[in-house]
Image (cartoon, rainbow, N blue to C red):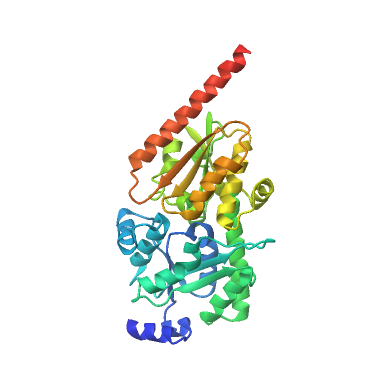
Amino acid sequence: MRSLRIRRVRKGMSLKHAQGSKAAMRVGVPRALMFYRYYPFLKMLLEGFGCEVVASPPTNLRIMGMGTDLCVDDICVAVKALFGHVRHLEGEVDAVLVPRLVSVEKKDYDTFTCPKLIAAPDMVRFSFPHLPPPLEFVVDVKKAPFWWGCLRLGRRLGVSLRGIARSYAAATREQRRFEDLQREGLLPEDALKRMENGNDGPPPAYASAERDVTVAVVGHPYLLGDPLVSKRLIHWLDSSGARVLASTMLSRRDLEREARKLPDLSWSYEWELLAAASHFMEADGVDGVIYLTSFGCGPDSLVTEMVRREVPNPHGRALLDLVLDEHSAESGVRTRAEAFVDLLRHRKRARSREVEKR
């Protein structure tokens, strides 16, 4: 039955027809890469299309190990996590949704995302031959508006135009709610948990403005949102008594305001990180900045240098580059996080003594 379904899909038939009418189609969404940016939107959209959405569990050592075994050594840890999550979903779902993000903004010059985001569906397609071809949610705003990808996905699943429009409107509201929670000071993982639990609850301890040291962490959502990949960096900063801000908490308006001071950058998501670093270097109350990146990420390696060379640092704030991969030890990240917080406290006390002397 499964091989018959795969053959029908590959011949171009409707996936909804291939699944049959007795049960909802199970669509797996890997908890990696753009999951931490678009999952609420995609989940609501697919459920509106009549699908059952199955998200892979949080990354664990088994998932990361499977992804590492499937990938070449020198690719970034985010792609290894993606492969591990797809392997976990294999055999559990009827199809896997892998977004293809080509261009996510319109500017006077060419813009594009990281090559791994553009090629993610192709990497999955050719690395997992026993899976049906992954469903694609294509975003290429240089050629078509954002909603066009939703329309193509809905028609591929056999959904009517009215059903697509209704699902798109509901998904947009859900995505706006997700982004609002992050603007309020939640990290992607905590914002997702709050949406799933359906309650407000108390703010997390790391968001407390009463703490004596504030650390801003700049990094992609798939690094900030995945505790195993980040080696629980946020937890160690929190346990050290630091207030934690993150680049995911900034609004589009904040980023665009900072971008006017900086060189043009064609990588859209790296442009966001560059603008976020600039914001935190000058924002009131920030004591230090951690730039979080994954080993083997070419765009991030260049942007890290741009942060040091191009971003103004009028207050002389401490900047820590933290490079991670699947071999990084959590104890090492804990040591560096605690040492960084201690350094910021020492500098803050030293400045207070200088002010008192004056």
Quarter of image, res 2: bottom left
Residue at image location 64% in from the left, 53% down from the top: 264
Quarter of image, res 112: bottom right
45 above or below 312? below
Residue at image location 33% in from the left, 39% down from the top: 331
Q: From the image, which quarter does the N terminus lie in?
A: bottom left
Residue at image location 54% in from the left, 36% down from the top: 208
Residue 31 rendering spot, x and y as whole percentages: 43, 60
Q: Nearer the viewer, residue 235 or 294?
A: 294
129 above or below 20? above
> 296 left or right of 103?
left
- Residue 97 visible in rendering: no
Q: From the image, which quarter does the C terminus lie in?
A: top right
Residue 191 rendering spot, x and y as whole percentages: 52, 51
Residue at image location 53% in from the left, 58% down from the top: 37
Q: Number of callouts in the render?
A: 0
Residue 330 rendering spot, x and y as whole percentages: 35, 42
Residue 260 rendering spot, x and y as whole percentages: 69, 48
- Residue 161 visible in rendering: yes
> 227 left or right of 112?
left
